């Protein structure tokens, strides 16, 4: 193999959860540009269909697989059916996630439970359902989307911080159990990126000024700046990288 093919995903099929918009959509687009066939997932069927259409317009081969990542029954049935009727899922990007802000002493218990189901339980549900098939084949790539909050807390988002810390540790656990079967499981931890999830913060001039001063790179990230790291963790280039969390954050977790 020539080294310039290390990042080539031709012949691979990649499932990205929560790919209807934001980071998931851009990661799906990036994996497609590296040669992968894409399986887009989202809970919202219209958004899923629109995202798939955009990727097809750009020349990608796209499958639509709508399911709720927090519903264990839907997850298992959807993954098993896709594997038996269409083919192997070689790459999984566990991206679907949410944010909810409130002072911890007032944080609603039902929002806490909901957030945990979406941000951490789903990584286990979808990861396990896909990994079973990857283990049979002796190969597979899983990229779990973590966060700058994997490492650092911020006021009013303690449950999110807990959930993203858990995603990083589940990533290490997955690597510990599954690396021997030929799988590479790693985390990709975005800093602050402009998406629907952060639209309120982007519009908040005070927050943006604080963030620009706090981040060594001095600005918000653009979602396309996550693509290179995702392709790396999804390709042969990372064949001996396992259980690692790669921060793409303009240096914010490296600096006080
Ligand atoms: P986003 O714009 O809200 O996109 C998330 C997508 O996931 C939405 O289309 C959402 O649909 C979908 N989704 C929600 N619940 C789902 C479910 N149960 N099953 C399937 N799909 C579901 O978020 P984003 O900013 O792109 O963030 C993506 C990931 O990156 C998250 O894990 C987030 O925690 C992480 N992250 C983001 C940032 C950032 O700066 N944006 C930074 C660090 C980490 P609905 O909108 O209909 O719910």
Image (tube, rainbow, N blue to C red):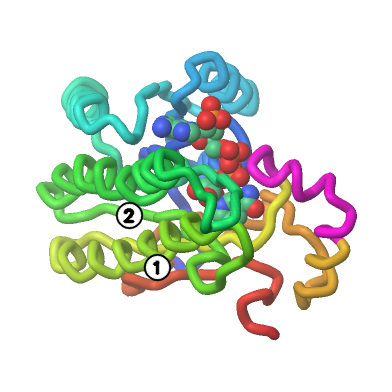
Q: How many marks?
A: 2
The reply to whether callout 2 and callout 1 are in contact (CB within 8 Å) is: yes
Q: How many angstroms separate mark 2 from mark 1 (CA)?
A: 9 Å
Front residue (pair 217, 230): 217
Q: Quadrant of residue 170?
A: bottom left
> Which badge, 2 or 1, comes first in the chain's sequence?
2
Q: Residue furthest front?
A: 105
Q: Is residue 94 left or right of residue 57?
A: left
Q: Tag 2, which secondary structure?
A: strand
Q: Quadrant of residue 13?
A: top left
Q: Name the main secondary structure of what is drawn in magenta.
A: helix
The spot of residue 74 in percent (x, y) is 25, 25
Q: Is residue 45 left or right of residue 217?
A: left
Q: Tag 1, which secondary structure?
A: helix
Residue at image coords 70%, 70% = 250
Q: Answer yes or no: disc 2 within 8 Å of ligand 1.
A: no
In the rendering, which numbered label is found on residue 141? 2
Q: Is residue 51 left or right of residue 139?
A: right
Does residue 29 appear in this view? no
In the rendering, which numbered label is found on residue 247? none
Q: Please provide the residue range marked out in magenta.
A: 195-208
Q: Quadrant of residue 80?
A: top left
Name the residue that disc number 1 marks.
238
The spot of residue 133 in percent (x, y) is 16, 43
């Amino acid at each position: 193999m020539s080294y310039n093919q290390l990042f080539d995903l031709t012949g691979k099929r990649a499932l990205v959860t929560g790919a209807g918009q934001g980071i998931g959509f851009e990661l799906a687009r990036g994996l497609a540009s590296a040669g992968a066939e894409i399986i887009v997932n989202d809970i919202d069927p219209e958004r899923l269909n629109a995202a798939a259409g955009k990727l097809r317009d750009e020349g990608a081969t796209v499958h639509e697989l709508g399911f709720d990542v927090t519903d264990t029954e839907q997850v298992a049935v959807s993954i098993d059916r896709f594997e038996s009727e269409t083919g192997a899922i070689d790459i999984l990007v566990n991206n679907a996630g949410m944010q909810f802000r409130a002072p911890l002493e007032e944080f609603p218990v039902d929002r806490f439970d909901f957030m945990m189901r979406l941000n951490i339980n789903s990584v286990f549900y979808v990861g396990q359902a896909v990994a079973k098939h990857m283990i049979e084949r002796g190969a597979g790539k899983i990229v779990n989307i973590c966060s700058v909050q994997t490492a650092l807390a911020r006021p009013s988002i303690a449950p999110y911080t807990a959930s993203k810390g858990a995603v990083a540790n589940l990533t290490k656990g997955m690597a510990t159990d599954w690396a021997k079967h030929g799988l590479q499981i790693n985390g990709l931890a975005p800093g602050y990126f402009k998406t629907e999830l952060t639209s309120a913060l982007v519009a908040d001039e005070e927050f943006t000024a604080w963030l620009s001063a706090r981040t060594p790179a001095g600005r918000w990230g653009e979602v396309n700046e996550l693509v290179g790291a995702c392709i790396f963790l999804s390709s042969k280039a990372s064949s001996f990288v396992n259980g690692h969390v790669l921060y793409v954050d303009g240096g914010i977790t490296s600096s006080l």
